[in-house]
Image (tube, rainbow, N blue to C red):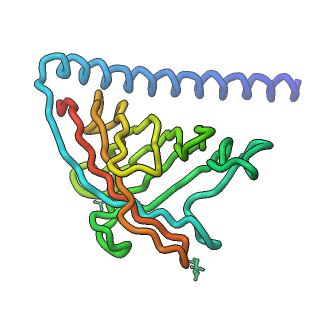
Amino acid sequence: MEKLCRVLILCLLLISAAHATSRRREAKEDEADKWFKSFSQQKQKFAKLRFYIQDKLGGPNATIWEVARAEITATSPTMFGQVRVLDDLITAEPDRNSAKVGRAQGHIASSDLTTSALTMNLNFVFTAGKYNGSTLCILGQNPIGSSDRELPVVGGTGVFRMARGFSISNTYSYDAVEDYGVLEYTVYVSYVDV
Ligand SMILES: *[C@@H]1O[C@H](CO)[C@@H](O)[C@H](O)[C@H]1NC(C)=O
Ligand SMILES: *[C@@H]1O[C@H](CO)[C@@H](O)[C@H](O)[C@H]1NC(C)=O
């Protein structure tokens, strides 16, 4: 009898959890439906953003770490097959102590056998200013040996819903002793601000 009660209570708990989940989902869908309806009536907006990524490559507090490599990575001139995950600080100016704008999070893979190039999935997670809470997603090929590297912006969230665009990036500085790089990103993006 006691066992049956326990089973019944468990079932009730599961059912009410399922109801709460479905209510949450309905609320989210309502919000998305309303947004999408206004979206279809809005004009596109455009923004040009410039910020700096603090790429701390070495030391115990590095913000980029290798998670996998291939058998040939160690002998490859381009580190082919190396996969790294990063969570870099984004600042408003090149100085690492300038205003914090957000984080650049994602994973990058060395994916060119002959020239150094990365396949990037990079998410700009804004944590300050008018884009606080919004994200932009970069996905594409990054020929790291070149300057003015162009990458596509394939989407975004928050203010940047339905975003599209591209970014131009350059290495602003690199300190070999500290193994610390600063990358400059200029992002051109169109989006719909409902
Ligand atoms: C790493 O970060 C910790 C905590 O912020 C700090 O105390 C330490 O000095 C840092 N180490 C280096 C080598 O930067
Ligand atoms: C960004 O937004 C979060 C959540 O709304 C808020 O807690 C935080 O204070 C904001 N940060 C800045 C720097 O405005």
What's the residue at 80%, 43% (across, down)? 71
The image quadrant of residue 32 is top left
The image quadrant of residue 97 is bottom left
Q: In which quadrant is the C terminus drawn?
A: top left
What's the residue at 38%, 26% (across, down)? 28
Along the viewing direction, whichever of 103 and 18 lies nearer the viewer: 103
Q: In which quadrant is the N terminus drawn?
A: top right
The image quadrant of residue 80 is top right
Q: Is residue 165 left or right of residue 68?
A: left
What's the residue at 44%, 52% (across, down)? 104
What's the residue at 45%, 27% (across, down)? 24
Report the label total.
0
The location of residue 177, given as percent across then percent down, is 55, 78
Against 2, is 188 above or below? Answer: below
Q: Quadrant of ligand 2?
A: bottom left
The location of residue 147, given as percent across then percent down, is 36, 51
